[in-house]
Image (cartoon, rainbow, N blue to C red):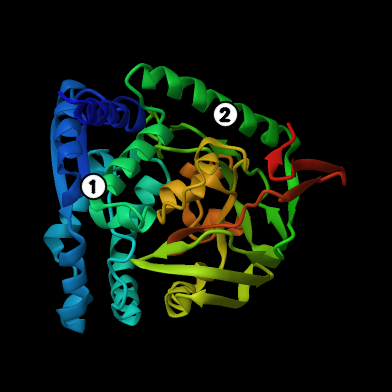
Amino acid sequence: MNKKEILTKKLASLAVRVGANVQKDQIVVITSDLHAAPLVKFIQKEAYLAGAKKVYVEWNDDELTRNYYTYASDETLQEIPEWNLSKMRYFVDQHACRIVIDSKNPHAMKGVDVNKMMMANRAIGPKTAFFQNHYSSSKSQWTIVAYPNDEWAQTVFPNLTVDEAWDKLFDAIMYTSRISLDHDEKEEWKNHTKDLENHSKKMNAYNFKTLHFENSLGTNLDIELVQSHIWAGGGEMGGNGVYFVPNIPTEEIFTMPHKDKVNGKVVSTKPLNYQGTLIKDFYFIFKDGKVVDFDAKEGYEALKSLLDLDEGSSRLGEVALISYDSPISNLNILFNNTLFDENASCHLALGNAYAMNVVNGTTMKEEELVKLGYNVSLTHVDFMFGSSDMKITGYTHDGKEIPIFVKGNFVF
């Protein structure tokens, strides 16, 4: 094997053995774009070597998806066949683990009617929510890794040839995933997740009531956290008792904001790729948890469609902290991909919260979680607002004021 094949095989092993942590006799579902077929083949083989009972592969393609939203009737866009729902129920009932390979063109849906996509999401989302909630609540293992494609690579490195851009993006993916020829990536991730979990333990010990964010770009935001919140990061313990790492790469620790107790302004620091449309230079103003004003220099309609999707899509479901001085940030590359860009910067998420971010949350009913401040939505979309001068102050329930970030980085 050449160098590229060796590194791809190492990424596959990492996805199976650390990311999803595939168990003996477990069903595995791989979801991937066609571009990533070389990685899929390695993952399938590695999953069987790990003892998987059966490996299913579900393929996506940007052009096929674009054609579907462009030419299918409104009636068709709002339908999902029963066999598809039955398949999802089977995977949930069997506690299948999911491995998602992100290899999309950031501009794939540019020019497609966002109202048609929103209509489809509104119609199909409630029917498939059980499947999304099963994995977002970590009841079974799941992980996301990335693999380049030509179009994505050229948005990241527009001044290079297609082949040069692809190779450079491949190298960046491997570097941020802590994969190299001369290191044991599994040992690297063992140490890395331990570091993130130590940060989470410190934040949990403070049990902050409110976080205040401010920087020179205009962010001035107060976020109250739900009571009994949990900071998490690195790896998670699934509801089936299996430890796994959801995102490769990851640099974040995150928790649950109260859906009704966010106030102030937040200004984005990186573009947001939402359903194939890049949204640039945007801000939100929150009052009592809800976005009451917003703007964007580019992608305004796509951003509006996100906020209008449902009641929860204009409220926060996650707050995540990442030091500005981090491996992904220090590359100084705009990936135009949330998996990477969210891990280069503090970020917030509009939409559904994670039940794991509150004590006993994964065993609670949705109505119980909502009473605590849990946000419910068909979507969960991260956007980045961290900066080199970000200041974060935590306020405890007994009134203590604790510095968390100074000049963009953790102080403890």
Q: Which is more N-terminal, label 1 or label 2?
A: 1
Name the residue that disc number 1 marks: 163
Q: Amino acid at mark 1?
A: Asp
Tell me if I can see residue 254 in this picture.
yes
Q: Is residue 140 visible?
A: no
Across and down, in percent, residue 6 comes to: 22, 25
Task: State the image quarter where residue 315 is shown.
Answer: bottom right
Spatial CA span between label 2 and label 1:
38 Å
The residue lying toward the viewer, choosing from 352 and 38, is 38
Residue that appears at 50% across and 44% down: 343
Q: Position of residue 116 (x, y in %)?
A: 29, 80
The one nearer the camera, 243 or 361, is 243
* Residue 172 on image: x %, y %: 38, 39
Q: Secondary structure at mark 1?
A: helix
Residue drawn at 23 percent across, 26 percent down: 3
Dot 1 surroundings within 10 Å: few (below 14), some, or many (20 or more)? few
Q: Which residue is mark 2?
A: 197
Q: Quadrant of residue 29?
A: top left
Is the residue 163 above or below the residue 273 in the image? above
Q: Tell me residue 277's x, y (percent).
A: 37, 69
Identify the residue at horizontal 44%, vertical 21% (top origin): 188
Quadrant assignment for the N terminus: top left
Q: Is residue 233 left or right of residue 199?
A: left
SS state under label 2? helix
Judge the density around disc 2: few (<14), some (14-19), many (≥20) Cα neighbours within 10 Å.
Answer: many
- Location of the C terminus by quadrant is top right
